[in-house]
């Protein structure tokens, strides 16, 4: 699936780059800050989605929950459109949810749209959400495995 997506997206990106000729000037600080932001975003998304998957211990049809999660993720992470287009109060809430920390924050950091203070707040929020996601993951996984084992015993 990912290879097919890349096969479709890569040529479009190349063509659009030549057509619009964006001015991407990335400083060394921005590039260095982007790497840990990206790694934390990947870890956060993995932990949240694994937690969602572990709900299958209790709910046999997790697909609806996953679809709801991905719809919310698409809109509140900045994937569909930048959060700047959301109404003020909705944007403020979206910026503090984990979805923005999984995608919007690293992208805005790479584009140089964040001050050093905003970047530090963003890293702190990523770490806090990651810690919470890992705690929830450990709880759901441990209880789920215990329940699953008890059923077969």
Image (cartoon, rainbow, N blue to C red):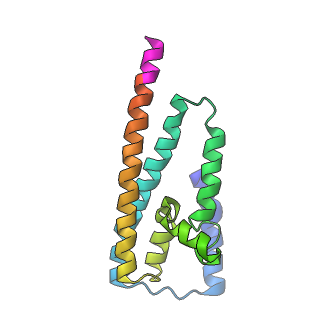
Pick whichever, 124 or 39, lies toward us: 124
| Residue 31 within the magenta-colored segment of the rendering | no
| In this view, 148 is above or below 4 | above
Q: Which image quadrant: the C terminus?
A: top left
Residue 45 x %, y %? 47, 54
Q: Name the side, left or right, on which 7 lies relative to 51.
A: right
- Magenta range is 147-153
In the foreground, 38 or 15: 38
Q: Quadrant of residue 112?
A: bottom left
Q: Is residue 28 above or below residue 39?
A: below
Q: Residue furthest front?
A: 89
Q: Residue at x 56, y 64 (%)?
A: 77
Q: Position of residue 129 (x, y in %)?
A: 41, 57
Q: Residue at x 41, y 29 (%)?
A: 143
The answer to whether residue 39 shows anywhere in this view is: no
Q: How many marks?
A: 0
- Image coordinates of residue 43 in percent, x first then y, are 40, 54
| Residue ID at (64%, 39%) | 63
Classify residue 91 by image quadrant: bottom right
Q: Position of residue 70 (x, y in %)?
A: 61, 52
Most distant residue in the top direction: 153
Q: Magenta region's main secondary structure? A: helix
* Res. 66 visible in picture: yes
In the rendered image, residue 149 lying in the magenta stretch gets the answer: yes
């Amino acid at each position: 699936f990912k290879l097919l997506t890349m096969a479709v997206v890569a040529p479009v990106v190349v063509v659009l780059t030549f057509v619009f000729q964006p001015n991407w000037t990335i400083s060394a600080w921005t590039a260095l800050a982007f790497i840990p932001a990206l790694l934390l975003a990947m870890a956060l998304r993995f932990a949240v989605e694994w937690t969602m998957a572990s709900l299958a211990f209790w709910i046999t049809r997790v697909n609806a929950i996953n679809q709801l999660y991905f719809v919310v993720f698409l809109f509140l992470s900045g994937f569909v459109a930048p959060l700047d287009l959301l109404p003020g109060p909705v944007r403020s809430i979206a910026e503090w949810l984990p979805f923005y920390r999984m995608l919007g924050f690293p992208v805005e950091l790479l584009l140089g749209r964040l001050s050093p203070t905003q970047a530090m707040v963003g890293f702190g929020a990523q770490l806090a959400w990651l810690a919470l996601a890992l705690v929830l993951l450990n709880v759901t996984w441990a209880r789920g495995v215990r329940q699953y084992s008890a059923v077969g015993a």
